[in-house]
Image (cartoon, rainbow, N blue to C red):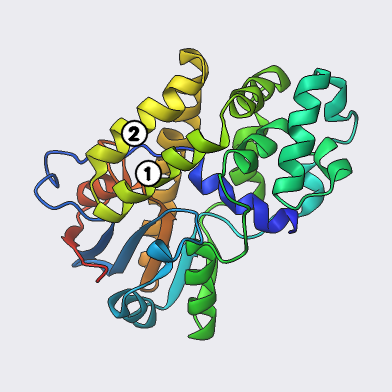
């Protein structure tokens, strides 16, 4: 597995999804946004997994991609080098017991141990929190491939520096807190939480996802660090995403695939598109 494949897991770092009063009556993670002054936007909330319960896409999803001129996703593949530590090795910051855990998880995720020693702690935390080895066949990647097959332009909403730089802005100490929190989670707990989140995602119920997220991620980390992650990973990025999606929609019809965390809530893409004058209709994935 390459770092490029692994890095798309950032889409699962956090799920913040609570339906606003304006959209609570319709729970959905697939929307059509229409405006009299701009092109149609199809908005699809993703979860980064290759589980076939999530990747069995409906014909309506493919039809929406076909009806669009461009496919937009959070970012395109990064350069591997930017995800590595160049001045130190992770082994210098870990205890012998923590190092043994990292080696075991690296083996589980089919990752060379020496490569793991040079990865940034936040990246390892994201990878190691998956209860299953990661593959290139995750939901967002498959949607991108379908768009390419249909000859659609593929656009990264954020450039790679913006996207991955969000995590790089956390101090090395904060990143180690994230990694240690993941090392303290058993395989059984990870699998249980994965099933809970996946079932909430499949139900399209944002409120359930929110409560699960607070119970899982919020309890894993110190409260100040959790709040900092929410602000930087969700709130700040939502504003940037909406701005760029709306700008693109002035020129062409777009299918937008972003983490489900970015859709709902007062500052989510759904509410922000409504504020920008779009009428939103919930679509079914079946």
Whether residue 65 is visible to the viewer of this picture, yes or no, is yes
* Residue under the point 88% across and 30% down: 89
Tag of residue 197: 1
SS category of the residue bearing label 1:
helix
Check disc 2: other Cα within 10 Å, few if <14, some if 14-19, many if 20+: some
Residue 173, how many percent across, how many down? 70, 17
The front one of 224 and 187 is 187
The front one of 84 and 108 is 108
The front one of 268 and 17 is 17
* Residue under the point 60% across and 24% down: 184
Tag of residue 151: none
Whether residue 159 is visible to the viewer of this picture, yes or no, is no
* Residue under the point 57% across and 31% down: 186
Q: Is residue 127 left or right of residue 96?
A: left
Q: Earlier in the sequence, mark 2 or mark 1?
A: 1
Q: Which residue is mark 2?
A: 212
Residue 108, how many percent across, how many down? 70, 47
Q: Is residue 3 left or right of residue 127?
A: right
Residue 137, how many percent across, how many down? 56, 66
In the rendered image, the vertical position of residue 145 relative to residue 175, given as above or below: below
SS category of the residue bearing label 2:
helix
């Amino acid at each position: 597995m390459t770092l490029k494949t692994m890095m798309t897991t950032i889409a699962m770092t956090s799920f913040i999804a609570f339906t606003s009063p304006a959209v609570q009556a319709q729970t959905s993670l697939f929307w059509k946004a229409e405006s009299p002054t701009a092109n149609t936007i199809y908005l699809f909330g993703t979860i980064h997994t290759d589980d076939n319960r999530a990747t069995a896409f409906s014909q309506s999803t493919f039809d929406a991609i076909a009806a669009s001129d461009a496919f937009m996703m959070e970012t395109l593949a990064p350069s591997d080098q930017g995800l590595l530590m160049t001045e130190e090795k992770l082994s210098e910051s870990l205890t012998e017991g923590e190092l043994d855990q990292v080696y075991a998880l690296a083996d589980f995720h089919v990752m060379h141990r020496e490569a793991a020693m040079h990865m940034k702690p936040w990246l390892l935390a994201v990878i190691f929190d998956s209860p299953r080895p990661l593959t290139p066949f995750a939901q967002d990647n498959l949607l991108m491939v379908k768009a390419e097959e249909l000859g659609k332009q593929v656009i990264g909403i954020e450039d790679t520096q913006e996207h991955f730089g969000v995590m790089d802005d956390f101090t090395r100490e904060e990143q180690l807190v994230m990694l240690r929190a993941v090392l303290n989670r058993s395989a059984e707990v990870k699998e249980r939480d994965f099933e809970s989140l996946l079932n909430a995602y499949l139900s399209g119920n944002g409120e359930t996802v929110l409560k699960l997220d607070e119970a899982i991620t919020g309890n894993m980390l110190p409260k100040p660090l959790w709040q900092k992650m929410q602000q930087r990973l969700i709130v700040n990025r939502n504003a940037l995403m909406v701005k760029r999606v709306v700008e693109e929609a002035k020129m062409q019809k777009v299918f937008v695939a972003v983490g489900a965390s970015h859709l709902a809530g007062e500052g989510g893409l759904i509410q922000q598109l409504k504020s920008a004058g779009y009428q939103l209709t919930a679509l079914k994935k079946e």
